[in-house]
Image (cartoon, rainbow, N blue to C red):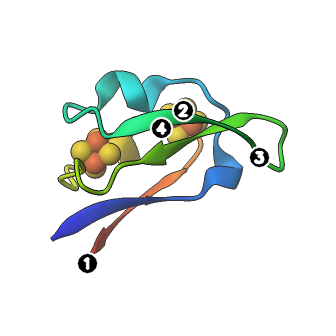
Amino acid sequence: MRKAVIRPENCKACGVCMANCAKSAISMTDEINIRGYKHITVDKDKCIGCGICYIVCPDAVFTIVEE
Ligand code: SF4
Ligand code: SF4
């Protein structure tokens, strides 16, 4: 089964991925990453590994992996 995994240190909290995930699997945390931005997290129970987040994120946060 495919799932999205993230590099939270790359996130700039723009929200584009959240707006495009059809499964509402992505949410913003209150944690601040090394670049000074909040970052997202992925609910693996909701994620279907469709890859849309990988396509739309401008900062290479997502990778789709086989688990
Ligand atoms: S792979 Fe698809 S379902 Fe999973 S977080 Fe990304 S957009 Fe959402
Ligand atoms: S699109 Fe990328 S940079 Fe923007 S909030 Fe989502 S993961 Fe972060």
Q: Is mark 4 within 8 Å of ligand 2?
A: yes
Contact, mark 1 vs mark 4 (Cβ under 8 Å): no
Q: Is mark 2 within 8 Å of ligand 2?
A: yes
- Mark drawn on residue 28: 2
Which residue does the numbered mark 1 point to in the structure image? 67
Which residue does the numbered mark 4 point to in the structure image? 57
Which residue does the numbered mark 3 point to in the structure image? 33
- Rendered location of residue 46, percent (x, y): 22, 47
Contact, mark 3 vs mark 2 (Cβ under 8 Å): no
- Rendered location of residue 22, percent (x, y): 20, 31
Residue 58 visible in the shown view: no
Q: Earlier in the sequence, mark 3 or mark 4?
A: 3
Q: Is residue 9 left or right of residue 55?
A: right
- Rendered location of residue 26, percent (x, y): 39, 38
Q: Amino acid at mark 4?
A: Cys
Q: Earlier in the sequence, mark 1 or mark 4?
A: 4
Q: Amino acid at mark 3?
A: Asn
In which quadrant is the N terminus drawn? bottom left
Q: Give the Cα distance between marks 1 and 2.
A: 23 Å
Observer-side mark, 3 or 4, equals 3
Q: Is residue 19 above or below residue 24?
A: above
Report the residue at 35% width, 49% height from top.
Answer: 43
Q: Amino acid at mark 2?
A: Met
Question: What secondary structure is marked by label 4?
Answer: loop
Q: Give the Cα distance between marks 1 and 4.
A: 22 Å
Count of numbered circles in the view: 4
